[in-house]
């Protein structure tokens, strides 16, 4: 099933495929049948382009694990938030997610849970001939689930079952690449089309993302405790409770000692996170109600390059948004701007005064698709428009203001190029080497950095590594920094980090790695640490 890796063609989409934006996360509005069909389409796409896809089923735990309490606070788990935003398909697993989408005016027809998707997918794969791999679960629960699925779906092809222990926090996660190698080799040898991952959130999502660049599998789906449901070890609530959103009451009744606090904290945090957004949305609709009712008919607002007074970069396409950007405008668009072959897209917000959740979902889907296909997108005219406050409130401001418009990574063996995660040496200061790390340092780019070449270039000095231009790092990137630190230590040298951006610092804290690195707020403080004896610097 192996295929050459190259640029990812965009899967066919249309404006009718609605996306609801819930707290900055695009949720696809699909029925269970549509989700199954879409999953198999994504699995088949791997055979053409060699890019594994990721499917996420979002519930309250995902939202509260990923996000900060307020729209102005840093994400609680920046890596998980990035995964949720970029996942190829995201469904609403929990009814609170559905309710919140309805409050924001973009109703999701129904939820698609991992507990429903896995059995339905197995049934469809028994007919289509696709191969299924079950990863995770406690003890032999994975094998029991595989046996049960085959019993229910004669002809289902089980490619394999494996239940490893994985680390996504603490010092042990820094050895993840070596620890995961055996699991990845098992999966690749089995050549599955779909991989069900039952590590729980956020382990399952982080594990797939950090190994995605070396996995040979069509689709990975995190399904939490679904194996328990499949074998009947944990029973599902009656259908009427599932449909009315009362399944959580049934689950608490089954295990009150363990679950009551989890649900109480989760629902309380979601309410606090959602209230400002709902109030802001209601205010915006009240503020623009007359214009929404009496505006002229929708017209095509897509202009060709060069029509703006600020000429776009060569080959870019410009999407000029009208004053009112809502569900009616989205329906008027005949094609997605991410379907053309242009390398760059400019979204012009200069004239926009109102955006509803449907339009935000549409724009977020454009951003996600272009990011996953490594094509550039950037915004213009945001700073002084009324929609700026809305983007901040909906937690999407960073999507359109951060520099996400990088080209593909440099070929293996180079230290970097424009827009990649770049290690760039600077002039030494007082005998201490200085380098700047910029761009994105994720699993794909970390695999392309040559630490041996970089270490040789720096010579035998201590190193101050400036992270002020590092926009994003994942757990694999942290592992690479730790490898660099250990390499320096083995040579009697030290590495100090400085100027960490909030997402980088937060990921280091939530993965409990902060104490493993010598770090400081500023260059001056880091230089002072490196000038001290090693025993004093680590206090």
Image (cartoon, grey):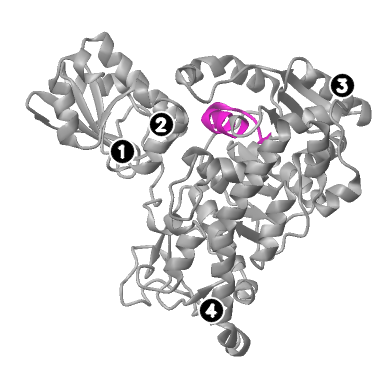
Q: Which residue is mark 3?
A: 147
Q: Position of residue 69 (x, y in %)?
A: 51, 49
Q: Position of residue 217 (x, y in %)?
A: 65, 31
- Marks 4 and 3: CB-CB under 8 Å? no
What secondary structure is found at the residue carrying circle 4?
Answer: strand
Residue 48 seen in the figure: yes
Q: Is residue 296 above or below residue 95?
A: below
Tell me what residue is drawn at x 27 percent, y 9 percent.
Answer: 490
Whole-number angstrom distance, CA of label 2 to CA of label 3: 40 Å
Mark before the other along the chain sequence, 2 or 1:
1
Q: Position of residue 400 (x, y in %)?
A: 43, 59
Whole-number angstrom distance, CA of label 1 to CA of label 4: 38 Å
Q: Which residue is mark 4?
A: 324
Mark before the other along the chain sequence, 1 or 4:
4
Would residue 247 be found to the left or right of residue 429 on screen? right
Residues shaded magenta: 204-221
Q: Name the foreground residue: 385 vs 162.
A: 385
- Marks 2 and 1: CB-CB under 8 Å? yes
Q: Quadrant of the C terminus?
A: top left
Would residue 533 be found to the left or right of residue 469 on screen? left
Q: Is residue 100 above or below residue 511?
A: below
Q: Pointer 2: residues within 10 angstroms few (<14), some, or many (20+)?
A: many
Whole-number angstrom distance, CA of label 2 to CA of label 4: 41 Å
Mark before the other along the chain sequence, 4 or 3:
3
What secondary structure is found at the residue carrying circle 1?
Answer: loop
Q: Name the foreground residue: 256 vs 458.
A: 256
Mark before the other along the chain sequence, 1 or 3:
3
Whole-number angstrom distance, CA of label 4 to CA of label 3: 54 Å
- Marks 2 and 4: CB-CB under 8 Å? no
What secondary structure is found at the residue carrying circle 3?
Answer: helix
Mark before the other along the chain sequence, 2 or 3:
3
Q: Which residue is mark 2?
A: 508
């Amino acid at each position: 099933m192996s295929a050459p890796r190259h640029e990812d063609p965009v899967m066919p989409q249309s404006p009718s495929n609605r996306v609801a934006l819930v707290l900055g996360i695009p949720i696809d509005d699909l029925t269970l049948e549509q989700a199954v069909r879409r999953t198999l389409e994504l699995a088949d796409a791997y055979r053409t382009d060699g890019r594994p896809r990721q499917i996420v089923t979002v519930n309250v735990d995902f939202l509260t694990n990923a996000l900060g309490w307020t729209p102005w606070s840093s994400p609680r788990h920046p890596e998980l938030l990035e995964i949720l935003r970029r996942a190829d398909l995201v469904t609403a697993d929990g009814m609170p997610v559905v309710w919140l989408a309805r409050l924001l005016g973009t109703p999701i027809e129904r939820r698609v849970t991992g507990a429903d998707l896995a059995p339905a997918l197995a049934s469809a794969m028994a007919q289509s001939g696709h191969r299924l791999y079950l990863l995770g679960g406690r003890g032999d629960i994975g094998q029991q689930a595989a046996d049960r699925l085959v019993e229910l779906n004669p002809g289902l092809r089980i490619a394999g079952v494996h239940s490893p222990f994985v680390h996504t926090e603490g010092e042990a996660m820094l050895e993840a690449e070596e620890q995961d190698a055996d699991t990845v080799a098992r999966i690749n040898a089995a050549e599955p089309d779909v991989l069900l991952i039952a590590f729980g959130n956020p382990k399952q999502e982080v594990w797939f993302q950090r190994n995605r660049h070396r996995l040979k599998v069509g689709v990975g789906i995190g399904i939490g405790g679904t194996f328990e449901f499949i074998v009947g070890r944990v029973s599902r609530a009656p259908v009427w409770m599932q449909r009315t959103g009362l399944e959580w009451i049934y689950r608490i009744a089954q295990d009150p000692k363990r679950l009551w606090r989890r649900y109480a904290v989760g629902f309380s945090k979601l309410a606090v996170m959602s209230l400002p957004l709902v109030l802001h949305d209601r205010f915006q609709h009240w503020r623009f109600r007359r214009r929404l009712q009496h505006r002229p008919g929708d017209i095509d607002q897509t202009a060709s390059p060069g029509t703006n007074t600020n000429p776009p970069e060569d080959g870019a396409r410009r999407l000029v948004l009208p004053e009112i950007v809502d569900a009616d405008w989205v329906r008027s668009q005949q094609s997605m701007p991410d379907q053309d072959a242009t390398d760059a897209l400019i979204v012009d917000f200069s004239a926009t005064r109102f955006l509803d959740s449907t339009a935000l979902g549409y724009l977020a889907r454009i951003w996600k698709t272009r990011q996953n296909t490594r094509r550039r997108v950037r915004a213009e005219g945001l700073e002084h428009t009324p929609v700026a406050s809305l983007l901040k409130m909906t937690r999407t401001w960073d999507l359109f203001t951060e520099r996400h418009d990088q080209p593909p990574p440099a070929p293996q063996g180079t230290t970097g190029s424009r827009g990649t995660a770049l290690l760039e040496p600077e002039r030494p200061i007082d005998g201490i080497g200085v380098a700047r790390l910029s761009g994105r340092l994720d699993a794909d780019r970390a695999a392309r950095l040559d630490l041996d070449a970089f270490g040789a270039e720096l010579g035998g000095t201590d190193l101050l590594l400036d992270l002020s231009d590092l926009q994003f790092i994942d757990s694999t990137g942290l592992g690479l920094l730790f490898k660099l630190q250990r390499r320096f230590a083995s040579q009697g040298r030290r590495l100090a980090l400085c100027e960490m951006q909030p997402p980088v610092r937060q990921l280091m804290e939530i993965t409990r790695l902060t104490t493993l690195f010598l770090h400081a707020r500023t260059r001056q403080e880091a230089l002072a640490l490196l000038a001290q004896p090693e025993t004093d610097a680590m206090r």
